[in-house]
Amino acid sequence: MQTLFAWLLMLTVLQSHVNSKFLDDYCGAPISNQSITKLRQPQAGWLAHISNGTHVLCSGSLISKQFVLSAAQCIDVHGKLFVQLGVSNATKSPHWYTVSNVVIPSHSGKRLQRDIGLLKLSQSVDYNDFVYPICIALNTNTLDMVKILQNFTTSAWLSKNKNPQTIVLSQLSRDRCKLNLSGNVTPKEICAASLQRNNSCFIDSGSALTQPIIQGSNIVREMLFGIRGYVNGRSWCSEPAIYIDVAECVGWIETVVQQYDGTDSRAVATPEVNQHLKHSLSRMGKNILLFKNCRGNSLQSKLRARIYGPNYIGQGWFITHRFVITNAKDLPESAESLYVGLPGTLRSYDEFSVQSVFKHPEFSEDYKNDIALLRVHQRVAMGHLRPICMLLKENQQELAKSSPPISFDYVQTANRIQVVRKIDALADPRICTNRLLKTIEPNQLCVVVPPETVQKNATRGGILGLRMMYSGKEWLILFGISSYSHNDIEVFTNVMEHTQWIANVVNSDFRL
């Protein structure tokens, strides 16, 4: 009763006759209860439990007939996932759905503040009074109301209750959150906690931060304002926690859902055609590029790989339609244990298995020669996305190195995350050696980076590129791959120094 009273009080905050378009029109309340004349506390029909078949990993929110929104780090795992809907209803049996695809923004690993991901269900959900989506306002002005809200609701677990319960959370000041959390709370994040201490109350990662609104004169809906960021396990309801502000992600969410409703952009594993590969792969001495069909001058045009293995997730880049370049350190050596996905696309789980692992023969655990090649079983083709270019000829490499190298930052704009390239200057190896207290090898590159950039953007497997004009067009050329960062220094393995080994592995494996 106390929770219902608090919910009714919060409802008065948003009695401004919200006029907003939603991602799904049948959202925020049971089909038979979308009227203020039948007002009752919502039962969180959008609540989803995400499972690997044996354990519940986290919570999520149903946002349309085939998509569930959750925390990216929770769902970015190897193996099959399942979604359970209808869990808020104590009298009905929940429904199980298989996850067919997962979509995670390419920037999601950078920081918790945009730790979101979407699960695509294998079949459409039939809405009823116990299963329905949460409202996501497509008008960001509506979502900006989060700044004036003092309270929200979320689903929590209480030890005395078998089913999740709706509780009230209060929005906390950033100063108060800083005292309880490591790191700053940005203006694009929400900090909230229950003001009532209860040692038997827990909240899952991926849980929804919601608020009831009145639309028009008599329609009551529950609207999504935040997603609880990833934590290792459950956390106390009274502990201050970070929620991702949905207003910062709504453009990306809408794009992904609409993209699926239009054409399915899922990667297609096409049959291997040896003759095609023979024409596409360059022979040493005949061409300047390892792979001819690698055109494109932006990072967004390149095929990026997410590599999964036992207790391992890594990043790499396709250099042909069958080969991925990545870091050798910590990479499992058993090909049978590795799988490759395509982040930022509607990829299927276990879509590309790995056939062979090639670590550089002179690799050592102290990051020397820190590169490896993976050969996937099937040729990967993905619309406009292409492998990244590699130069074969030394004179062309020297020509490309005459221009300054470029790296890439992720920048938040009004509606989406943009990948912005920036010009870097290679640092004197002696400076890097002094800062790192570690010798920079001749086949390594180092860049001095501002402290906040190192923490936010330095990611193993990230690339250092070069720009080069070829056939009247600008091409993005692979120069280095990030190995590690420390003390404002980012160290890259110079991929160009290993061109001969890379070309030999690629060409000999195809018996060209």
Image: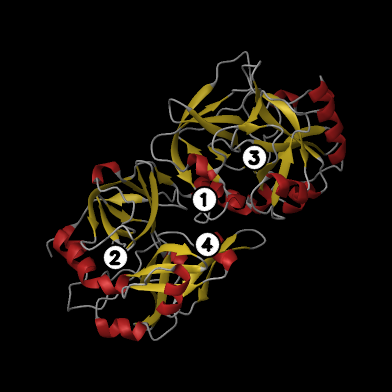
Position of residue 68 in the picture relative to residue 300 (left or right) = right
Mark 1 closeness class: few <14, some 14–19, many ≥20 residues within 10 Å? few
Relative to 512, residue 219 above or below: above
Q: Residue at x 47, y 27 (%)?
A: 55
SS of the residue under disc 2: loop
- Determine which of the numbered discs, if any, sits on residue 259 in the image: 1
Disc 4: which residue? 457
**Residue 267 place in picture, x, y as percent:** 38, 51
Q: Nearer the viewer, residue 460 or 261?
A: 460
Query: Which badge, 3 or 2, is on the more N-terminal residue?
Result: 3
Distance Cα–Cα, label 1 vs label 4: 28 Å
N-term-proximal mark, 1 vs 4? 1
Q: CA distance from mark 2 to mark 4?
A: 22 Å
Q: Residue under circle 3?
A: 24
Q: How many marks?
A: 4
Extreme residue in the top direction: 91
Q: Nearer the viewer, mark 2 or mark 4?
A: 2
In front: label 3 or label 2: 2
Q: Amino acid at mark 3?
A: Asp
Amino acid on which the number 2 mark rests in the picture:
Asn
Disc 2 designates what residue?
A: 369
Of helix, strand and loop, which one carries label 4? helix
Q: CA distance from mark 3 to mark 2?
A: 51 Å
Precedes in sequence: disc 1 or disc 3 = 3
Question: Residue at point 63% right, 15% down?
Answer: 90
Cα separation, mark 1 vs mark 3, equals 15 Å
**Closer to the N terminus: mark 2 or mark 4?**
2
Camera sees residue 159: yes
Q: Earlier in the sequence, mark 1 or mark 2?
A: 1
**Residue type beneath disc 1:** Gln
